[in-house]
Amino acid sequence: MLPTAATTQTLLATEDLRIRFGAREVVAGVGLELAKGRTLGVVGESGSGKTLTALAMLGLVPAPGMVSGSMRFEGQELLGLEEPDWRRVRGGRIAMVFQEPMTALNPTMRVGRQIAEAMVLHLGKSWHEADIEVLRLLDAVGIADAPARARAYPHELSGGMRQRAMIAAALAGRPGLLVADEPTTALDVTIQAQILDLLADLRAQTGMAMIFISHNLAVVGEIADEIAVMYAGRIVERASAERLLSSPRHPYTQGLIATLPNPEHRTERLATIPGHAGDRPATGCRFAPRCGRAEEACLAVEPALISVSAGHDVACVLA
Ligand SMILES: Nc1ncnc2c1ncn2[C@@H]1O[C@H](COP(=O)(O)OP(=O)(O)OP(=O)(O)O)[C@@H](O)[C@H]1O
Ligand code: SF4
Ligand SMILES: [Mg+2]
């Protein structure tokens, strides 16, 4: 088959990605596709496997986790790479930002040096060239007084500044893909909005693609072109952001949307979907114990992700 325009633009494609710890499969067959320059939002509640899926893309699933399936990036299979090859990918073609910058930044190294290091390592720049580029990059991520900040240690920066510095470090190797795992969750609402704007701007300027992970569908909806909804290690629905938010087909997605805060009727407390993902039946749909529309057929076999319209896939017997 000749490659179509769509397939030649594919940057990352995972197929049947599985991660297990002993007998416990925590990511259970995830298929994601991302085109160059696009933003894919991954949403799901705590424990649904978002972070492990992201870590798998950087070869960072902790031992004794076992990863299987396929993960192709720029046409190359990543699963099975040896550590030296992962080091070339990581921080180079694929970079990641986390919720907590202190886990990503080295506390004993000046901020500017850490950013410069990625440029030397992945772009082959001299330290002198890199030091100049660092100032430009700090400026681009909205850090004022870049020369002073470059000389600072991470703990000398505020939370919002550290997040910006981590983003600068992630961008230093000019990645084709930035994986952002709950990058705004620990920040207060105003700074959250600034960081979201910054990521959207940087994505537009650099043409990189982004995977944006959050438990918060409202946040994901603001930044993503496409959204994948994860539940208990599986994708239960994926569609364009517009379609997913306006015509959700999976009862779990519908529940997530129903619990979004409504700016017109502010409630004290956010509603949640009752129950939790740990209550899982032995067979059939993982969401059945919490689903208001569950019927006998739901417990027979696990619903496969099927296409309900172009670019819109749902894993539910009702679809
Ligand atoms: N190192 C590990 N060893 C064993 N189990 C793990 C390990 N890391 C994660 N898990 C389990 O895998 C599941 C998915 O974890 P993961 O961190 O990917 O969830 P998440 O969707 O990112 O959740 P959160 O929103 O809380 O960040 C969880 O049940 C978790 O307990
Ligand atoms: S398959 Fe059944 S239990 Fe699962 S989400 Fe659909 S209706 Fe609910
Ligand atoms: Mg997580």
Image: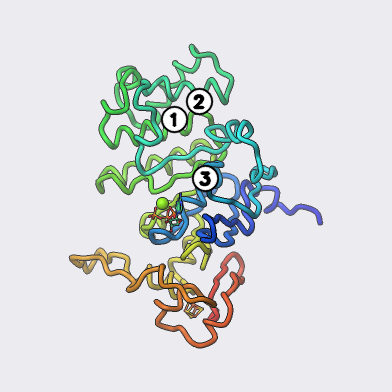
Residue that sits furthest to the front in the current view: 22
Q: Which amino acid does label 1 sit on?
A: Ala
Q: Toward the viewer: 280 or 176?
A: 280
Q: Where is residue 100 in the image (x, y as percent from the top left)?
A: 35, 40
Q: In the rendering, which numbered label is found on residue 216? A: none
What residue did someone put label 3 on?
A: 63
Disc 3 element = loop
Q: Residue at x 60, y 31 (%)?
A: 88
User: How much space separates mark 2 and mark 3, taking CA atoms?
Assistant: 25 Å
Read off the residue under disc 1: 169
Q: Give the percent coordinates (x, y) of residue 37.
A: 56, 44
**Relative to 211, is 246 above or below?**
below
Ligand number 1: quarter of image: bottom left
Sequence-first tag of 2 and 3: 3
Q: Residue at x 63, y 49 (%)?
A: 71
Instruction: Return the x and y of residue 137 as percentages of the image width and height.
Output: 43, 26
Residue at image position (58%, 78%) is 301
130 shown above or below 243 = above
In the foreground, 269 or 299:
299
Label for residue 118? Answer: 2
| 292 vs 10, nearest the viewer | 292
First in sequence: mark 1 vs mark 3: 3
